[in-house]
Image (tube, grey):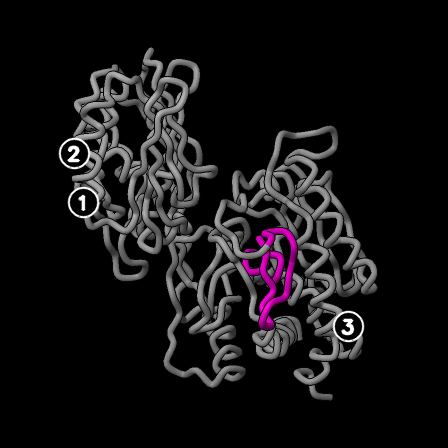
């Protein structure tokens, strides 16, 4: 029986199930009874589990934190894991198609989650279905593990593997990156930089920590009108991403337009917050808190994302250069707050980096409030899992040139032992994750469905 031809019989059904999933807005919201991450993620998790149940698998929901879908029997002692998530980042603005419409235009399905991560996980689920229906004996059980809080806090995996002490598969992959195999994932250090303020200036940038902010707005007193009118044309001259100005409710409102991108790849975007801070540096802002933060950005950040001015420009051979993204900015409880999302190379330690940051922040009267810390992941290229997945990729695509890669993205590979990210973004495919018009090219299913059924088969046989 030809696995690769058989799995393609499920293509239309897969597309329909994915459309149903994309139409569920699964951005984290305030918790509700029985819904720790809000209604959307809970509904998206339940939908995935219901599809798994309909396809003939045993499913279980763990308090709407996470769930799993099992293919196999209880007497199979070893298990292959497929890890992914059903939550998504906020949609942002500027879409050409409804971000939760799952519209198919020119054979591309548009919607938040089509690439990250509902699309790849649905492909893997239908690969499991095809393999089950073929009745091929497998040594290992296959378990799809779904989280509902990957984009924000990983409370899902902490609950599943930590609180519930669920067993780790002997070998796993997560289709939450790109091909070929991601053997190294940078460490993640996320924090809030804070400074006290009693100013009536208000500012708002970004919606999430792990994305380059597309829009930043600030409201200033009218006393800055003259200098803004003088400096703004000079600043905007020759720039594609400009800052606009309007008078509203006797306030000057400045709007900085940028380009969104994943925090792991800030070079693909244009940070509207950093740009605005640079412009504000021309205005001689005197209000406490804002004065210090603006000076900090102009001295130590500017439009950089590699930490050179900050003194933390770290690089190593396995994973490359550090990246730093400032994703959110707001005033709350008498403090001006800016979020930092850092992805640091795998051979360095967070403690050493924090010491350098603390020293710089003290110079400007800023404080450091930690949010998240993830250690790096590094699986050597000669590891069985990396070698096996590389062989599958090469056999299925004919690409013998690409080598195992490192990433600044943080995937569920860090949540479980002996796991790496594998796909699902094919070579040469535009990466629209965390960006407007996120989409999956349905023609890629002809490659991805056979590739993932072969992957599951080789790991489980």
Residue extent of the magenta highlight: 98-119
User: Farthest bottom residue?
Assistant: 1
Along the viewing direction, whichever of 371 and 431 lies nearer the viewer: 431
Q: Which of label 2 and label 3 is nearer to you?
A: 2
Disc on the earlier residue, 2 or 3: 3
**Residue 141: where, in percent of width, then height?**
71, 65
Which residue is at 39% across, 48% downward? 263
* Location of residue 271 (image quadrant): top left
Give the SS element for disc 1. Answer: loop
Q: Residues within 10 Å of mark 1 (few under 14, many from 20)?
A: few
Q: Is 416 above or below relative to 457?
A: above
Q: Answer with left or right where residue 397 lies relative to residue 76.
A: left
Along the viewing direction, whichever of 455 and 53 lies nearer the viewer: 53
Tell me if residue 99 is in the magenta stretch: yes
Q: CA distance from mark 2 to mark 1?
A: 11 Å
Along the viewing direction, whichever of 318 and 246 lies nearer the viewer: 246
Give the SS element for disc 3. Answer: helix
Give the SS element for disc 2. Answer: helix
**Residue 177: where, in percent of width, then height?**
48, 61
Q: State the residue position of label 2.
A: 299
Q: Is 319 above or below relative to 340?
A: below
Q: Answer with left or right where residue 214 lies relative to residue 70.
A: left
**Residue 106: where, in percent of width, then height?**
58, 72
Which residue is at 48% across, 51% downward? 434
Which residue is at 39% across, 58% downward? 407
Dividing the image into 4 quarters, which one contains the C terminus? Answer: bottom right
Q: State the residue position of label 1.
A: 308
Q: Which of label 2 and label 1 is nearer to you?
A: 2
Along the viewing direction, whichever of 114 and 309 lies nearer the viewer: 114
Tell me if residue 158 is in the magenta stretch: no
Q: Which of label 1 and label 3 is nearer to you?
A: 1
The circle drawn on residue 132 is 3
């Amino acid at each position: 029986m030809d696995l690769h031809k058989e799995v393609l019989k499920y293509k239309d059904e897969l597309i329909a199930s994915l459309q149903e999933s994309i139409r569920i807005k699964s951005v984290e919201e305030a918790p509700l009874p029985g819904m720790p991450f809000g209604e959307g993620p809970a509904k998206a998790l339940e939908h995935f589990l219901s599809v798994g149940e309909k396809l003939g698998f045993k499913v279980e929901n763990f308090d709407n934190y996470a769930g799993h879908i099992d293919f196999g029997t209880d007497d199979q002692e070893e298990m292959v894991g497929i890890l992914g998530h059903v939550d998504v980042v906020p949609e942002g603005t500027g879409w050409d198609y409804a971000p939760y419409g799952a519209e198919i235009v020119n054979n591309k399905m548009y919607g938040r989650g089509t690439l990250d991560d509902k699309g790849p996980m649905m492909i893997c689920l239908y690969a499991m279905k095809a393999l089950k229906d073929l009745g091929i004996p497998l040594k290992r059980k296959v378990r799809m593990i779904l989280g509902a809080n990957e984009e924000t806090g990983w409370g899902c995996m902490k609950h599943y593997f930590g609180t519930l002490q669920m067993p780790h598969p002997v070998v796993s992959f997560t289709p939450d990156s790109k091909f070929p195999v991601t053997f190294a994932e940078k460490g993640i250090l996320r924090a809030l930089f804070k400074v006290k303020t009693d100013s009536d200036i208000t500012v708002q940038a970004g919606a999430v920590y792990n994305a380059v902010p597309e829009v930043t707005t600030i409201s200033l007193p009218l006393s800055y009108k003259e200098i803004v009118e003088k400096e703004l044309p000079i600043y905007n001259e020759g720039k594609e991403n400009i800052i606009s100005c309007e008078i509203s409710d006797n306030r000057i409102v400045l709007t900085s337009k940028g380009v969104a991108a994943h925090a792991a790849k800030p070079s693909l975007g244009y940070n509207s917050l950093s740009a605005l801070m640079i412009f504000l540096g021309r205005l001689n802002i005197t209000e406490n808190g804002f004065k210090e933060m603006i000076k900090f950005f102009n001295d130590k950040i500017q439009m950089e994302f590699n930490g050179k001015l900050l003194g933390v420009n770290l690089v190593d051979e396995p994973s490359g250069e550090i990246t730093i993204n400032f994703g959110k900015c707001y005033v709350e409880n008498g403090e001006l707050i800016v979020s930092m999302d850092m992805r640091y190379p795998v051979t360095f330690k967070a403690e050493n980096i924090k010491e350098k940051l603390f020293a710089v922040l003290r110079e400007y009267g800023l404080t450091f409030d930690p949010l998240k810390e993830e250690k790096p992941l590094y699986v050597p290229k000669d590891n069985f899992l990396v070698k096996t997945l590389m062989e599958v990729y090469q056999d299925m695509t004919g690409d013998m040139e690409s080598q195992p890669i490192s990433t600044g993205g943080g995937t569920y590979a860090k949540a479980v032992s002996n796991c790496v990210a594998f796909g699902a973004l094919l070579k040469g495919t535009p990466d629209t994750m965390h960006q407007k018009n996120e989409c999956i090219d349905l023609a890629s299913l002809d490659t991805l469905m056979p590739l993932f059924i072969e992957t599951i088969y080789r790991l489980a046989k």
